[in-house]
Image (cartoon, rainbow, N blue to C red):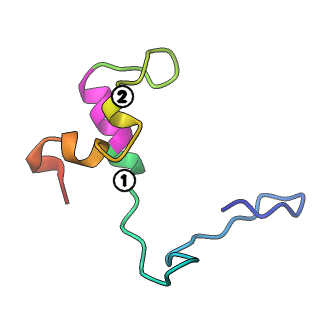
């Protein structure tokens, strides 16, 4: 989370603020790697629908799940 203090401060959230459960590991890097593997430029190309909702993790090849 960005801390709006006028600087570059940020804080990582590791627990759900509503239920207190530990949040799953970030999938950001995997998301970009899979787009690149498919030849999709995340800045210029249209992002497939399965990358925009809860279907995304299930759509990645088994060997990349971790």
Q: Residues within 10 Å of mark 1 (few under 14, many from 20)?
A: few
Q: Which one is nearer the viewer's eye here, 56 or 7?
A: 56
> What are the residue bounds of the magenta stretch?
31-38
Q: Secondary structure at mark 2?
A: helix
From the image, give the main secondary structure of the stretch colored magenta: helix
- Please name the residue shown 77% across and 64% down the image: 3
Residue 51: give x, y in percent of width and height.
35, 35
Q: Which mark is residue 27?
A: 1
Occupied quadrant, residue 23? bottom left
- Please name the residue shown 46% across and 25% down the image: 42
Q: Secondary structure at mark 1?
A: loop
Residue 48: give x, y in percent of width and height.
35, 24
Residue 27: give x, y in percent of width and height.
36, 53
Q: Residues within 10 Å of mark 2 (few under 14, many from 20)?
A: few
- Please name the residue shown 42% across and 49% down the image: 28
Figure check: 19 above or below 26: below
Q: Is residue 58 magenta?
A: no
- Please name the residue shown 51% across and 75% down the image: 16
Furthest residue toward left: 63
- Report the side of 56 relative to 63 (left or right): right
Residue 1: give x, y in percent of width and height.
66, 62
Disc 2 marks which residue?
A: 49
Q: Which mark is residue 18?
A: none
Occupied quadrant, residue 52? top left
């Amino acid at each position: 989370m960005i801390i709006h203090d006028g600087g570059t401060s940020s804080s990582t959230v590791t627990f759900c603020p509503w239920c207190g459960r530990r949040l799953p590991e970030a999938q950001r890097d995997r998301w970009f790697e899979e787009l690149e593997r498919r030849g999709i430029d995340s800045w210029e190309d249209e992002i497939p629908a399965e990358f925009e909702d809860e279907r995304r993790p299930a759509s990645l090849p088994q060997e990349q799940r971790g």
